Each structure stands twice: as C-alpha cells, then as structure tokens.
Image (cartoon, grey):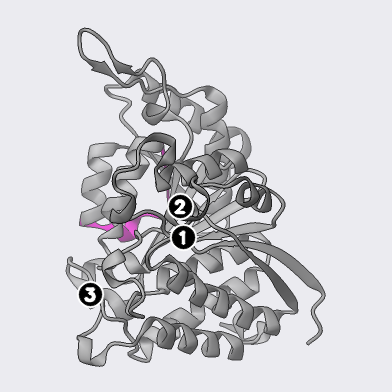
Amino acid sequence: MEDSRTYNITWLPGDGIGPEVTREALRVMEAVADTHGFSLSVDEHLAGGAAIDATGEPLPETTRTACQESDAVLLGAVGGPKWADTTGDQRPESGLLALRKVLGVYANLRPVRVPESLADASPLRPERVADTDVLFVRELTGGIYFGTPRGRTEAGVANTMVYSEEEIERIAHIAFQRAQLRGGHVTSVDKANVLDVSELWRSVVTDVKEEHYPDVELRHLYVDNAAMQVVRDPRQFDVVLTGNLFGDILSDLAAALPGSLGLLPSASVGGTVGLFEPVHGSAPDIAGTDQANPIAAILSGALLLDEIDETAAADAVRWAVDATLEDGRRTGDLAASADAASTSEFGRAVAERAADHTPQTTTAS
C-alpha cells in the first residue's frame, strides 16, 4: 500500500528502560502504518538524564525546537539514581515539566484497562476488576502544584490551590468530548463539601455539561468516596474528570488495578503538540537487560495514533496487545521468569499481530 500521509514524530528515548520500551512502541506503530496507508518520519533527540550528560541540561534547545515542530512526541521515562544529586532546573524531571510548558499541554489522559486475560494479575479479586476500562482526565497545569502564594514563611509553609473558570472549562470540554467517544458518562471528582475551589469546579463542570453536552451523563463524587469506589467497583467508571492533585492520587491508585505499572500509557494533550509516554519510571535496575514490559509504551503509541486521527491503526495496536496477551505471552513482571518473554520478543509479537490486522478486520471487530 502506497503511503499517502506522513507524520513527523519526535522520539525522546529518555533514560533507563526508556529507549528499550519506546523502541518497541515505534516498531509496532511502523507495522500498523504500513497496513493503514501512512508513514512515520522519526527524529530522535535527547531529554532527561541522557541530555544532562551530553549537553548539561535536561531539555536542550534542539530538543525543544524539534518537539514544537513535530506532529507528536513519544517519550521514554527520565531520571534515575545517577542524577539523584541534581537540583532545581537541572533535574531530569525538570526537562519534562519544561517540555509540557513549551507544548502547552494541560490535559493528562491515563486510560486504565484490565483485559480479562490479565485479571488474575491484579491484587484485587479477578471478578472485581476484569474488563475495567476507565479514562482519567487530569488537569495538568493548575491547582495546588502551581498556585500562589507558596513556599516557606516565618510562620510555616503554604501551598495554594487555585483554579480559574477558564482552566476548569477547558479540561471539562476534554473530558466530555472523550466520553462522547466512549460510554457517554463523566464522573467529576472534587471536595466541594470543604474547599471553595471545588465548589467552583463543580459549578463550572455542571454548566459546561448543560450548555454543550446534553448527551453525556454527569455525576459528582467527593474525592474520598471516589478513592473507595475505584477499589470497590472500578467498572462503574467511564471517564473520571478531576484536578491536578486529586488526579495524581486517583490515577496512581487505579494504576494498581492491572497489577503492573508496565501496562499503563498516558497522553498529555490540549496544546500545540501532544506528548505520549508510559506511566512507569526508568527502572535502572533492569535497564539494558531486555526484561522490561513494553506494553505501556506500545499503548502510549496507540494514544499517539488516536491523536493524529489514525484511529483505525490505534485500534489495531490495542487489539494486537490484547491478542498477544490472550496467546499467553507475558513479560517478567506478569509471568514466572522461566516463561517470560523479553521486551523485544513481546514487541515483535505485537507488531506481527498488528500488521496482520487490516483496517477491514479492525472495523469488523
């Protein structure tokens, strides 16, 4: 099939296992590109600790420019013990924060899926988590992490939770639009019984729903109840919308449902260019051993394909991951070591499955 569309992808391999798992993501993306009539032009750049070692800063200007000029950015994890003594703007993680700011992304999307084939890997009972499919939509640039005043005073220390109506409106639109593509239900999480800022959050979210999304159901939960419900009955959720702090906590709680961080992708969107990365860290203890689970990175690639409107290809990637798991293939975090597939073996198996899954069969499935 002759390519008719070409997308420029900036690849930031990162540190530790980042290069290994994102390499498999690219392998799978290129496999579905061939089948679905488009091509990827991949440009590799440094970020995080690797960039500090090479240039003295975690986000070099060349990387910054490349990301701004691309169609999407695929990022591996950054950081590790080697750079533990770095501080402030010289920390590897500071490069990630700077990149989010450069790209203007404000919505963090974290889907949590537990296919039936992996339900027995969950710390919860399989019948409680099997077929969980929830999307957390977390506001990424406001709230208590960024509000002022902040810092130490003579009396103590302060962090301030601040949200404007505009910030709440724009993240609410993202959540409702995603719900329209899924199950049509949004759960908005706040602490409106205690916090004035949550009262505004609840009011604005309700107004956005009533004015623009009459077809989407909306309910509100206090964050403490939401945390209990995520563990008690995760399948009740479709899209969960919440602020920066609550979203950070709840999405990490939900990350435990599948039984491995190696399964969870993420996307940061809403700005000029989307940023896609696995949720897990750089795992320096297994870096270079071909043992890491590449599923989170591969599924981050599927989110990237969704964002550039290659949704059939994205569906093929997700189908291929599920099919490979149903075949019994597991990496070491999900299987006994004697039976485990390596990073590259698992990635290759998914790529082969994805390449065989044509647009016609994707639609039919």
Q: Measuring from the top left, give residue 331's x and y in whole percent.
A: 31, 81
Q: Secondary structure at mark 2?
A: loop
Amino acid found under the numbered disc labelled 2: Gly
Q: Closer to the N terminus: mark 3 or mark 1?
A: 1
Q: Can residue 344 be seen in the rendering of this structure?
A: yes
Question: Who's the residue at 17% across and 67% down the image?
Answer: 123
| Badge nearest the viewer, 3 or 2 | 2
Question: Who's the residue at 18% across and 66% down the image?
Answer: 124
Q: Secondary structure at mark 3?
A: helix
The quadrant where residue 49 appears: bottom left
Residue behind mark 3: 121
- Residue 14, numbered circle: 1
The quadrant where residue 235 appears: bottom left
Residues in magenta, as a range: 232-243
Q: Secondary structure at mark 1?
A: loop
Q: Measuring from the top left, give residue 197's x and y in whole percent.
A: 39, 22
Real-space Cα separation, disc 3 to disc 1, in angstroms: 28 Å
Residue behind mark 2: 48
